[in-house]
Image (spheres, rainbow, N blue to C red):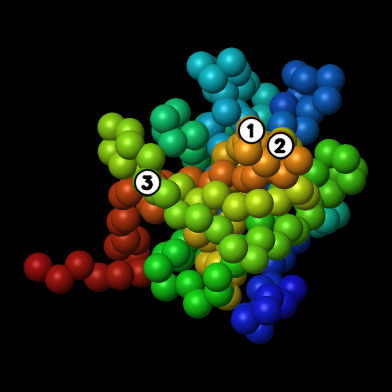
Amino acid sequence: MEEESHQLLKIESSQICIICDKDEKKPQLGTGFVFLRPNWVVTAAHVVLDDFKAPRDKLYAEFPDNRKLELPVKVLAVHKENDIALLEIIGDTTPGSKPLFPGYVELSVSKGLISLGYTPSKGRTITASLAKTYDKKIREREADETILEFESNQVEGGSSGGPIFGDGGAVLGILINVFTTEKEPDKTFARATSILNLMNGIVIDYNPEILISIK
């Protein structure tokens, strides 16, 4: 996929998934993506929390464009206020893809964004949407939350938890909801929380079998 800035974005089918619940008649709940580790999946918290309270018990990640692979997942951690959830794939099987990595909005050359997500109206598949411009805002919370907002008539509710990309495939944000405004009721807008709101909650460590500690 190529943007107007001629930056090439190449995403593997095994990097994006649909988050599902076996207990639901329609199991598809939202979108997720493999992030930082081969067995980590990121999505929106409201996708995996039952009534936004306890984690759902029978969650799995479906990779529809990767042999329709289905892998059980469990919720590791959530940030309800920022609507972020970190999941772990249960067992030794992984989708076999390179995990996605974060990027900074300030370092993105392109003025636009690309979002990927599950769109129920188009079937059980992942679709892409291009936004040529976006707004960056600060939402006052316990800790200020950076959010990205952009117009998109192709993003649907099933896209919640999907990745927002900048240049070169770096993840800039996580889609959390779609909305309309009284001023422009015919237009649909999408809102994403910055990936930095997730990174602030992840502790970076190292593997002593690979890196030797210097004392």
Marks 1/3: CA distance? Answer: 21 Å
The image's mark for residue 138 is 3
Q: Position of residue 89 (x, y in %)?
A: 60, 42
Disc nearer the start of the sequence (3/2): 3
Q: From the viewer's perspective, is residue 206 above or below residue 60?
A: below
Circle 2 is placed at which residue position? Answer: 185
- CA distance separating discs 3 and 2: 23 Å
Query: Does the image show residue 107?
Result: yes
Q: Residues within 10 Å of mark 1 (few under 14, many from 20)?
A: few
* Residue 77 against residue 105 in the figure, above or below: above
Crowd rating for badge 3 (residues with CA inside 10 Å; few <14, some 14–19, many 20+):
few
Closer-to-camera residue (72/55): 55
Residue type highlighted by circle 2: Pro
Callout 3 secondary element: strand
Q: Nearer the viewer, residue 166 or 61?
A: 166
Instruction: Measuring from the top left, give residue 104's x and y in whole percent.
Output: 42, 65
Please name the residue shown 32% across and 61% down the image: 206
Residue 97: percent from left, percent from top: 65, 63
Locate the C terminus by quadrant. bottom left
Q: Amino acid at mark 3?
A: Ile
Q: Amino acid at mark 1?
A: Glu
